[in-house]
Image (tube, helix red, strand yellow):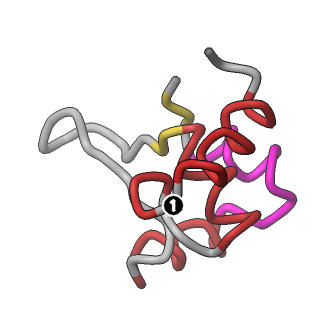
Amino acid sequence: MYLTIKQTSKLSGYSIRQIKRFIAKGILPAKKMSMRSNPKIWAYDLHSVLEFNQPYLRLKSHQKKMIEEIANVN
């Protein structure tokens, strides 16, 4: 599931401006579906960055399982 910057801000407690900074610094991975679209953040990436300070795909298998439980997505 992909989240908008506004949804990410509400879930994480960070401001929209801070989320944009995280994306610009490469701390929080974001994807653009087209050139004109707004960036989308994968829910797993958001939770893994908040918990482990790493994107989901860089986590170890036991950490991935924890994030999957937190995100409630199977």
Identify the residue at horizontal 36%, vertical 43% (top origin): 38
What residue occupies the far right of the structure in this picture? 13
Which of the 4 quarters of the picture holds residue 18?
Answer: bottom right
Left or right, 32 with respect to 61, comes to left
Magenta-colored stretch includes residue 10:
yes
What residue occupies the far bottom of the structure in this picture? 25
Which of the 4 quarters of the picture holds residue 40?
Answer: top left
Q: SS class of the residue under badge 1? A: loop
Relative vertical location of residue 34 with respect to residue 49 in this rendering, above or below? above
Find residue 26 and report its horizontal and vertical position in percent.
39, 77
Number of numbered discs present?
A: 1
Identify the residue at horizontal 67%, vertical 61% (top origin): 16
Q: Main secondary structure of the magenta part?
A: helix
Residue receiving disc 1? 59
In this orientation, which residue lies closer to the viewer: 47 or 33? Answer: 47
Relative vertical location of residue 73 with respect to residue 34 in this rendering, above or below? above
In this orientation, which residue lies closer to the viewer: 21 or 60? Answer: 60
Which of the 4 quarters of the picture holds residue 53?
Answer: bottom right
Find residue 67 and report its horizontal and vertical position in percent.
69, 43
What residue occupies the far front of the structure in this picture? 62
Residue type at mark 1? Answer: Leu
Give the quarter of the figure containing the C terminus: top right
Would you call the spot at circle 1 few (<14 residues within 10 Å), some (14-19), or many (20 or more)? some
Find residue 66 and report its horizontal and vertical position in percent.
74, 44
Q: Which residues are magenta?
A: 5-16
In this orientation, which residue lies closer to the viewer: 21 or 56? Answer: 56
Find residue 42 and report its horizontal and vertical position in percent.
49, 40
In this orientation, which residue lies closer to the viewer: 59 or 62? Answer: 62
Magenta-colored stretch includes residue 56:
no
Left or right, 10 with respect to 47, comes to right
